[in-house]
Amino acid sequence: MPLSDMRAVLTAHRAVGAFNFVQLELAEAIVAGAERAGAGVVLQLSENAVRFHGGVAPAAAAALRLAEASTAPIVVHLDHATDVELVEEAIALGLPSVMYDGAHLDDAENVARTASVVARAHEHGVWVEAELGEVGGKGGAHTPGVRTDVDDAAAFVAATGVDALAVAVGSSHAMTSREASLDEGLIARLAERVPVPLVLHGSSGVPDSGIDRAIVAGMRKINIGTHLNVVFTAAVREALAADSAVVDPRTYVRPAREAVAAEVARLAGLISHGAAG
Ligand code: G3H
Ligand code: ZN
């Protein structure tokens, strides 16, 4: 299938699951999960994952080729880029979507830099997600106590021209248990006032029921990373425990890839089609 873009997958589904990958097998699992769910997904590569691979190109090129070969609509997205150079690199490689994360900056600087990234990206038809304040767990907006102010969010979108906005509503990055509780009233107020799709970061810590209610309240993109790592690593541990003499990585990576594909299929179905599937 030709590469998909964010506007198309958001239009086609009630919300879209956005899944982070670190290595090739996780990307393969996410694409397989999307195909099984019959749903479009976002296949996203964070700045941290880019640093791990020593550049955007190796992992982004793999993701783009997987997306093109898939029967599901897949949007390849650069996630949490704080470095404008990485955004430029992603645009040059043909990624249709980027997140510029200026949440660590003071508000005026965040507005100025985000607006400049948006202008540059839009010259190439690239979708830009941004963040106001920080979303806990990385020391900022997606921390449990942090909340996005509705008026600030509306003003930020108007001043920057961003296509989507990550907001802080009670989730926190890198949770390994699914017990976060979201402020659904705030999500509804944000959805009413902010004229672009809202993005929930740190969704690994949110249970299925909370994800469903967040979507009903107005969330459109649901970012999930850590939870897939938890599923992958648990399956690796199980496979290694079953055979202590194993040396071929395929022996433990194959069941881990399958476990993640099954979980992505389940989550993508919930997110895109609703709990009833
Ligand atoms: O941008 C990516 C996400 O916000 C993922 O967060 O690893 O806590 O699910 P998570
Ligand atoms: Zn995030």
Image (cartoon, rainbow, N blue to C red):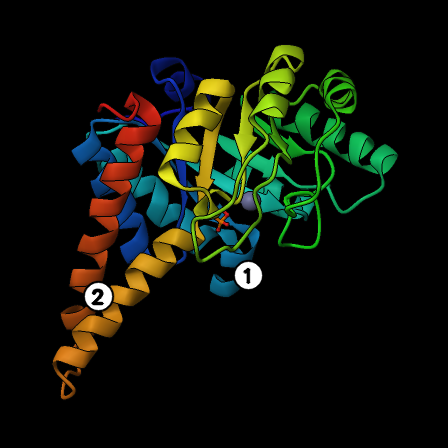
164 vs 212, left or right, is: right
Q: Please tell me whether mark 1 or mark 2 is closer to you in this view.
A: 2
Which part of the image, by quadrant, shows the C terminus? Answer: top left
Q: Position of residue 51 (x, y in %)?
A: 55, 61
Give the class, few, some or many, for how many residues have Cα within 10 Å of label 2's Cα (few <14, many ≥20).
Answer: some
Question: Could you say which quadrant of the image residue 30 lies in?
Answer: top left
Image quadrant for the N terminus?
top left
| Rendered location of residue 59, percent (x, y) | 41, 53
Where does the image place residue 220, in percent across and percent down from the top left? 47, 23
Q: Using the numbered discs, state the Cα–Cα distance from disc 1 to disc 2 in whole angstroms.
A: 22 Å
Q: Which residue is mark 2?
A: 253
Identify the residue at image location x=24%, y=29%. 72
Give the vertical position of 273 relative to 64 (above or below): above
Q: Residue at x 35, y 53 (%)?
A: 228
Residue 106 visible in the picture: yes
Please report the residue visible at 40 percent of the width from the left and 23 percent of the height from the top.
15
Q: Amino acid at mark 2?
A: Val
User: Ligand 2 is in which quadrant of the figure?
Assistant: top right
* Residue 132 drawn above or below residue 20: above
Q: Is residue 24 left or right of residue 211?
A: left
The amino acid sitting under disc 1 is: Arg
Q: Is residue 35 above or below residue 154?
A: below
Q: Position of residue 268 (x, y in %)?
A: 30, 33
Helix, strand or loop at disc 1? Answer: helix
Q: Residue at x 64, y 16 (%)?
A: 189
Can residue 95 be seen?
no
Q: Which residue is mark 1?
A: 51
180 to 162, vertically: above or below: below
Q: Splitting the image into 4 quarters, where does residue 258 fall?
A: bottom left
